[in-house]
Image (tube, coloured by chain):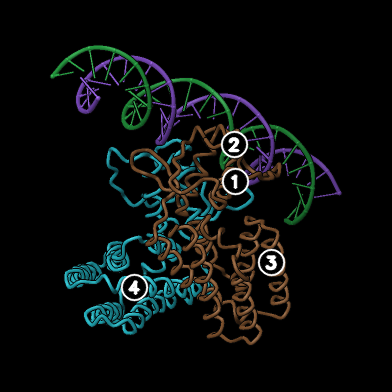
Chain colours: A brown, B cyan, C green, D purple
DNA sequence: CAATTCAAAATGTGATATCATTTGTCGATT
DNA sequence: AATCGACAAATGATATCACATTTTGAATTG
């Protein structure tokens, strides 16, 4: 199907094949290994992952419900294309939900959490400096997730994950700042707002962070 | 499994079994036929829908990705329980995403659309007056969907649908106002805001609408 | 009578086979 | 040379089967 091998993935023995296929395909979309527009076949993926069509099919259903892949009526599956319009909509959606998530989390923020997030940001900077985009992207997500998952009865996180997945490789590419480190500043602003427990600052900081990454990705991918 | 027959569902001949199972189970969750906490078995549902386990499993995977059902590690599936905390979180999430969706749609609103929405609201009022909760709930969703689906490159709608699904039967029960018709007023406010093309009014109206339904549902279901 | 044990039934998972459709290709026709 | 058509290969959809694990419930034990 492609020449690069799939991003490797460690499969615990107790993990079901369906779950394994889901995680691995998800990662393949995230990392851009399955590029937008790529058409998929159940049997092809089954062969690629050394599984039967059945678990592949279930994994694809999950991904399609997260809008990570598109089920075309004519019995064909593909990774959705990205357009400037869709990109903008997804970024705006990220802002809306993540600001909501951040504000909801604010009441549950503790100094310990802030320290952990700061540490996560440091690891992120290291990964970015090392040029490991996939790891940087994962750590960036972890930074945000740490915050949004604070409140109990969490319902926003799965939706945020869906948007992240749809932005897929486009976000990843923005992990390496060309000049300076724009995102580092954004994260610092988020951390400052958390320390002050200031909702307005936090909303502004999250908005800024999401949009700065978006700008970078947009100029890199869409306008080139 | 239960004594009431499943809500009937018209299956077009070209619809795949998997899609049919998905739609029908989705409706069953929405209507409360599958009550929160109900545990599901693949084989049981297969027998119920007269299908083999394979398409049922795919349908369940889709529903689980929409957080309409919960996959418990111990190989058991259940409809998630509702708690006051989760209910509040879902309502807040509805507000956040739907306000976003409404504001995004505002630039695409035309008089024709407003008229159609007004007509949809009239049908909704009729269904509510007739006591048909399921139909009223569906028409209420259609009213909102008509607005949010206006912008091209739509990405918010699937997430909104997921939240609707998770609120499931709780929203439905709020369709019948006890005294007067609170939602009618909310919808009227939304329509007024649309006519004026006023973003602030629209955001306030959507917030009010969602929360008024929520209040009603909450007092009915959670505090009883 | 409550707790425990253990076998039978049920369940989730995954592979395989079958069928109807679709896609792809090669050759004939215009 | 381009277009169309038919046949072959590939594909999605689904039922069925086999297997390992879990659940269940009744018999047993203290």
Task: Left or right? Give the position of B116 relative to C16.
Answer: left
Tell me the subunit letter for badge 3.
Answer: A
Distance in Å between CA atoms under marks 4 and 3: 37 Å
Whole-percent x and y of residue B81?
53, 63
Pointers 1 and 3 within a single chain? yes
Secondary structure beneath disc 4?
A: helix
Residue tagged 4: B102
Pointers 4 and 3 within a single chain? no
Tell me the subunit letter for badge 2.
Answer: A
Residue tagged 3: A125
* Residue under the point 29% across and 74% down: B106
Q: Nearer the viewer, residue A180 or A205?
A: A180
Q: Quadrant of residue A20?
A: top right
Task: Left or right? Give the position of A126 relative to A160.
Answer: right
* Residue under the point 31% across and 65% down: B151
Task: Left or right? Give the position of C30 relative to A170.
Answer: left
Pointers 2 and 3 within a single chain? yes
Residue tagged 2: A49
Residue tagged 1: A24
If you read the primary sequence from the N terminus, does the residue marked by circle 1 or circle 2 appear first?
Answer: 1
Q: Is residue B174 above or below residue A83?
A: below
Q: Quadrant of residue A55?
A: top right
Query: Mark 1 and 2 residues: CB-CB less than 8 Å, in contact?
Result: yes
């Amino acid at each position: 199907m492609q020449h690069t091998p799939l991003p490797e993935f460690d499969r615990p023995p107790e993990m079901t094949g369906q779950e394994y296929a889901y995680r691995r395909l998800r990662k393949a979309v995230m990392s851009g290994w399955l590029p937008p527009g790529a058409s998929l076949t159940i049997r092809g993926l089954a062969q690629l992952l050394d599984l039967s069509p059945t678990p592949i099919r279930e994994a694809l259903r999950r991904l399609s419900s997260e809008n990570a892949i598109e089920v075309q009526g004519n019995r064909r599956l593909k990774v959705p294309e990205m357009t400037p319009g869709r990109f903008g909509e997804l970024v705006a959606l990220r802002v809306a939900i993540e600001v909501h998530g951040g504000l909801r989390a604010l009441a549950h923020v503790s100094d310990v959490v802030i320290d952990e997030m700061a540490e996560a940001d440091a690891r992120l900077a290291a990964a970015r400096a090392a040029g490991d985009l996939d790891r940087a992207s994962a750590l960036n997500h972890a930074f945000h997730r740490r915050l949004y998952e604070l409140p109990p009865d969490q319902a926003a996180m799965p939706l945020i994950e869906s948007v992240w997945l749809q932005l897929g490789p486009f976000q990843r590419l923005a992990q390496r700042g060309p000049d300076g480190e724009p995102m580092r500043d954004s994260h610092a602003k988020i951390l400052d707002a958390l320390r002050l427990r200031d909702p307005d600052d936090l909303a502004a900081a999250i908005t800024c962070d999401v949009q700065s990454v978006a700008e970078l990705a947009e100029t890199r991918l869409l306008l080139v």
